[in-house]
Image (tube, rainbow, N blue to C red):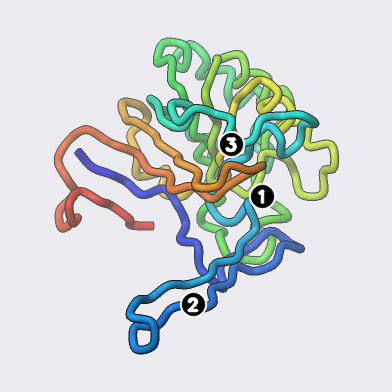
Amino acid sequence: MRIIDLSWPVAPGMPMFPGDPPVTLAPMGELKTHGHVSHLAGLPTHSGTHMDAPMHVLAGGAGLADLPLARFIGPGVVLDVRGRAGPAVEAADIEPHLPWLRAEAPAFVLLLTGDEARWGQPGYYTLGAHLSVAAAELLVGLSLSGVGLDAASADPHGSRELPAHRMLLSAGVVLVENLRGLAQLPAAGFEFLCLPFLGLDGSPVRAAALVPGTSAPGAAAGLVNEP
């Protein structure tokens, strides 16, 4: 089995959503002085590859700590929407694939938008791929556990209403943003996992795909982290 890492590393200096404070690390323990090494980490809950909980946009919505761990793992499929006409993923980009999606019955649909190539570049967070409300509604109709995308947000930058977020999260569909490496995955037949370590409105996650088969040549213990 191959384990393919789909997360960006969380570290000082990483790209951040405009206006968010940077990730910080401060030493707390040193070997010479304390006999151990430890650090104090500071970061926004929506740093890097992260998951949005319903409470992110919904009054009284559940936090990640309120959701069972089983919600964060399940069969995944990759839907390649790199050929779409504009930055928005429209219903027309998803509709032709609905028979296949219903037949696969995935827990997670991962949208390959191509925005990974712009990570760290100007405009990544402000001009990137996102979902139309009609596209989000189609995905909700598939009874998913979650939707993921290799882009900054399910809604366009500057939106205060966040309609795609609301559509998905109000239906209990968690949202994973800033994935990477989706082009390495098969279209289907893998297990997707995205485990949050904070139980709040959002949390960075270690997202990965478990793909049956042998490890890639040279991949240590089956862990592939190629992007």
How far across and down, in percent of the image, does residue 200 sit? Answer: 63, 43
Disc on the earlier residue, 3 or 2:
2
Q: Residue furthest bottom?
A: 32
| Residue displayed at 67% across by 28% down | 169
- The amino acid on which the numbered mark 2 sits, given as a three-letter code, is Met
| Residue 117 falls left or right of residue 33 | right
- Give the residue number, with chain letter if any, for mark 2: 28
User: Is 53 drawn above or below residue 173 in the view shown?
Assistant: below
Asked if 58 appears above or below 150 in the picture, the reply is above
3 vs 2, front mark: 2
- Is 178 displayed left or right of 59 in the figure? left
- Does dot 2 land on a helix, a strand or a loop? strand
Which residue is located at x 64 percent, y 69 percent? Answer: 22
**Quick one: which residue is furthest to the right in this view?**
160
Please state the horizontal and vertical placement of residue 118, each as a whole percent of the image: 56, 59
Q: Which SS class for mark 1?
A: loop
* Residue 178 visible, this angle: no
Percent coordinates x, y for residue 187 in the rendering: 37, 30
Q: Is residue 181 above or below residue 138?
A: below
Viewer-nearest residue: 125 or 193: 193
Q: Where residue 64 is drawn, which disc sits there?
A: 3
What residue would you read off at disc 1?
128
Kind of element beneath mark 3: helix
